[in-house]
Image (cartoon, helix red, strand yellow):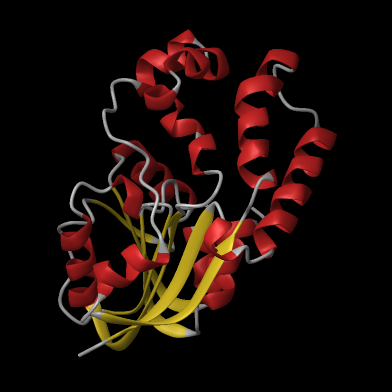
């Protein structure tokens, strides 16, 4: 699997280390890549089926099922914790940050990304069900719409200021990247809302063009206008 946009950026920010934890690693496709950076890689995922897949296909990754608010690991265990596109889904974000702080070693590194409160935040496909229900049904289809409406929570977006308040006294921010402007959310919208009407499965050239444009768009730091935000921070005592 080739790493792209957010996941490629997170990978480049990971230092060589002994132990790394990936929170919300899904099936482990991205998590497995961190074995190139860390001698021991752990993954925590709330979805049992995804954990089972990871254990079968990526046996070198130490996968567990669990919640970010209650990490099943001892104090000061990890050099690095990565959490890409996960914080916006947890029930208690402050408790999640506290747990990450607990399991990180002294001067440990946290790398996380979430949607950003940028200019095109309203184009988040996952939140169309709240803002424009009719349009959401058109984009995702009736069956998907029924499934999504069973999940009552908004897909949260964060600003840099919200990040700073959330991690204050626990982490010091080292790097920030705010990538993806109009092209990035627009291509998500096109993929979910238009292409599935035209193709049963996207042709290779469509996927290649989409991935190239999204990669280019995410590589540019748009500051407060961006659709996604990523930071790297160091644990404070």
Q: In the displayed structure, would residue 143 be above or below residue 120?
A: above
Q: In the displayed structure, would residue 232 be above or below residue 189?
A: below
Task: Please give the name of the residue rendered at 24% of the width and 77% of the height, measured from the top-left corner.
Answer: 168
Q: In the displayed structure, would residue 53 be above or below residue 236?
A: above
Looking at the image, residue 189 sits to the left or right of residue 56; the answer is right
* Residue sitting farthest toward the right: 205
Looking at the image, residue 91 sits to the left or right of residue 176; the answer is left
Is residue 8 in sight in this rendering? yes
Residue 237, x across and y down, in percent: 20, 90
Looking at the image, residue 122 sits to the left or right of residue 49; the answer is right
Looking at the image, residue 237 sits to the left or right of residue 233; the answer is left
Is residue 71 in sight in this rendering? no
Q: Nearer the viewer, residue 88 or 196?
A: 88
Quadrant in the rendering for residue 84 = bottom left
Residue 22, x across and y down, in percent: 38, 63
Task: Please give the name of the residue rendered at 74% of the width and 57% of the height, measured from the top-left corner.
Answer: 216
Q: How many marks?
A: 0
């Amino acid at each position: 699997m080739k790493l792209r946009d957010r996941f490629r950026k997170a990978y480049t920010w990971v230092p060589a280390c002994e132990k790394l934890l990936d929170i919300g690693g899904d099936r482990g496709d991205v998590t497995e890549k961190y074995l190139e950076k860390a001698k021991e890689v752990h993954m925590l995922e709330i979805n049992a089926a995804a954990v089972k897949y990871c254990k079968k296909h990526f046996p070198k990754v130490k996968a567990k099922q669990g919640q970010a608010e209650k990490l099943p690991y001892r104090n000061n265990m990890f050099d690095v914790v990565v959490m890409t596109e996960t914080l916006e889904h947890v029930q208690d974000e402050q408790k999640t940050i506290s747990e990450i702080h607990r399991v990180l070693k002294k001067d440990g590194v946290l790398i996380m990304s979430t949607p950003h409160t940028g200019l095109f935040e309203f184009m988040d496909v996952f939140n169309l069900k709240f803002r424009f229900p009719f349009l959401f049904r058109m984009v995702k289809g009736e069956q998907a719409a029924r499934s999504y409406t069973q999940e009552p929570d908004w897909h949260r977006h964060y600003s840099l200021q919200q990040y700073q308040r959330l991690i204050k006294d626990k982490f010091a921010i080292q790097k920030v990247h705010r990538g993806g402007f109009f092209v990035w959310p627009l291509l998500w919208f096109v993929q979910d809302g238009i292409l599935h009407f035209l193709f049963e499965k996207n042709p290779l050239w469509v996927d290649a063009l989409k991935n190239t444009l999204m990669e280019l768009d995410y590589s540019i730091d748009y500051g407060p206008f961006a659709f996604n935000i990523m930071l790297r921070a160091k644990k404070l005592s």
